[in-house]
Image (cartoon, helix red, strand yellow):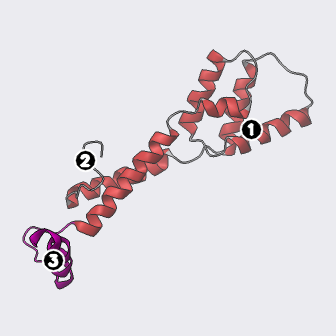
Amino acid sequence: MREAPAFSHVCSPAERSALVALAAATEAALAPAAPREIRRMIGKLALGFPAGKASDLEAEARLELYAEGLGDMPTDILGAACARVLRECRFFPSVAEIRERCVGVAVRRWELSRIRTLIATHDRDWRPEGEPMTAAQRVRLAQLTAPFSA
């Protein structure tokens, strides 16, 4: 995928098959963390900071807020962000501070977009060697080249 020269690259059927598998793996890598995983990470994170005075009800509500605010983050990216928070923050972080450290999501989304574009380009434009153009393709080619042949 990274070696394709451009989005307009028409890949071979074998490359398309590999891209389909890569798309599935990339989609899986973008799957959001389960709420229980987020709660576990935030619970561990809380151990790394001085205890605040909160009732069990308040602590439970806070965990729920964090689970909602971080619910779109993949598990591995959120885990890495929590590790960075422990190293970089002096106080228990807000959801926004954790999200700032969730790096890599945009890159994964862009890669998935590129993979899907390459698959779509193949599906639209790939022709086996020697396959003749259709009548509609010949008309379109004539339209495109007409300004240059005058």
Residue 137 among those drawn in magenta: yes
Quarter in which the C terminus is drawn: bottom left
Separation of marks 1 and 2 at Cα, in angstroms: 39 Å
Circle 3 sits in a helix, a strand or a loop, which is it?
A: helix
Residue placed under numbered mark 1 in the picture: 66
Q: Earlier in the sequence, mark 1 or mark 2?
A: 2
The circle on residue 4 is 2
The residue positioned farthest toward the front in the image shown: 150
Up-down relation of residue 16 to residue 67 (above or below)? below
Please tell me how many numbered marks the rendered image carries: 3
Q: Earlier in the sequence, mark 3 or mark 1?
A: 1
Q: Which residues are magenta?
A: 126-150
Q: Amino acid at mark 3?
A: Ala
| Tag 1 near tag 2, CB within 8 Å | no
Where on the picture, by quarter, is residue 128? Answer: bottom left
Mark 3 or mark 1, which is nearer to you? 3
Where on the picture, by quarter, is residue 42? Answer: top right
The residue positioned farthest toward the bottom in the image shown: 135
Q: Amino acid at mark 1?
A: Tyr
| Tag 3 near tag 1, CB within 8 Å | no
Residue placed under numbered mark 3 in the picture: 142
Q: Earlier in the sequence, mark 3 or mark 2?
A: 2
Circle 1 sits in a helix, a strand or a loop, which is it?
A: helix
Picture coordinates of residue 118, whole percent (x, y): 31, 56
In the image, 88: left or right of 24? right
Q: Main secondary structure of the magenta part?
A: helix
Question: Which residue is rendered at x = 64% and y = 45% of the image?
Answer: 34
Question: Which residue is rendered at x = 62% and y = 46% of the image?
Answer: 72
The circle on residue 40 is none
Q: Amino acid at mark 2?
A: Ala
Question: Which residue is rendered at x = 10% and y = 77% of the image?
Answer: 132
